[in-house]
Image (cartoon, helix red, strand yellow):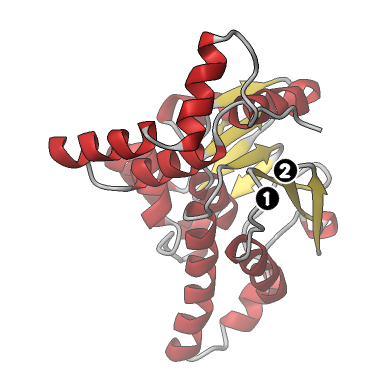
Amino acid sequence: MLNVESEGSVLRVTLNRPEVRNAFNDELIAELTAVFSHIASDVRAVVLAGAGETFCAGGDLQWMRKAAGYTESQNYEDALRLANLLKSISECRVPVIARVQGAAFGGGCGLVAAADIAVSAENGLFAFSEVRLGLVPATISPFVTPKIGTGHARHLFTTGEAFKAEHALRIGLVHDVVPLDSLDTAVNRRLKAILGAGPSAVARAKQLAHESPLSLDDAAKLLARTRAGEEAREGIAAFLEKRPASFVEEPA
């Protein structure tokens, strides 16, 4: 259901339900949440991918059929589990890269939006398809709307229309669109950049992007604390001495 592999300081998390296009069910949501809630201290980046030809087609039909018989209270608990999964990805201590191919529908789009970086193959196809089922993209909206803006959300949430990777790039849902056979190369390029930077600085920079804009005083204090740290001293010394910093790693 879920493959988790370590490659040096990179954790590769792969949805492994290709027979149902990597669709969500209770078990997959629980496994993913557990992984992203307990990232080891030596991990510096996570790659989130889908096995087979599809990234994630959204909700599993059997799971949704079962949920149709739930009470409102049971549906609330079920929806909250998916929301907490997306929160665990968004707030993961290290950068998360979504490696997208084929369909990313509904909750699959939520995964893409919750990731820090999204790299899509040219065959990527996206849709906030909930309204076509009489549903709303409620649990994914806190992650999608900040990424694409309210104007695009109003259009795509209300129509449920499918859109291609190039459109996803234009609205900011993904950050790179490449040929399918170049997808891993593009992901590794992003990994190389992350692993070439100070790990503590990267983690703090991700946190900074999540926060409200700092006051000038708080911004100056943050930079002062960072500049006085061991990691910054090593990074600046390495730059001046024209050598790789001790924290630089190469993707496996």
Which x, y percent locates residue 31? 70, 69
Residue at x 37%, y 50% (from the top left corner): 158
Q: How many marks?
A: 2
Mark 2: few/some/many CA within 10 Å (<14, 14-19, 20+): some
Q: Is residue 48 above or below residue 16?
A: above
Identify residue type, mark 2.
Answer: Ser
Residue at x 56%, y 57% (from the top left corner): 107
Residue closer to the observer: 65 or 105: 105
As measured in the structure, the alpha-carbon distance from the residue carrying label 2 to the one carrying label 1 is 6 Å
Q: Which residue is mark 2?
A: 9
Q: Is residue 21 visible?
A: yes
Quarter that holds the N terminus: bottom right
Q: Are marks 2 and 1 in contact (CB under 8 Å)?
A: yes
Which x, y percent locates residue 86? 51, 59
Identify residue type, mark 1.
Answer: Asp
Residue at x 51%, y 10% (from the top left corner): 240
Residue closer to the observer: 3 or 112: 3
Which x, y percent locates residue 40? 66, 58
- Left or right for 207, reference 78: left
First in sequence: mark 2 or mark 1?
A: 2
Residue closer to the observer: 207 or 230: 230
Disc 2 element: loop
Q: Which residue is mark 1?
A: 42
Where on the picture, by quarter, is residue 219?
A: top left
What label sits on residue 28 in the rendered view? none
Mark 1: few/some/many CA within 10 Å (<14, 14-19, 20+): few
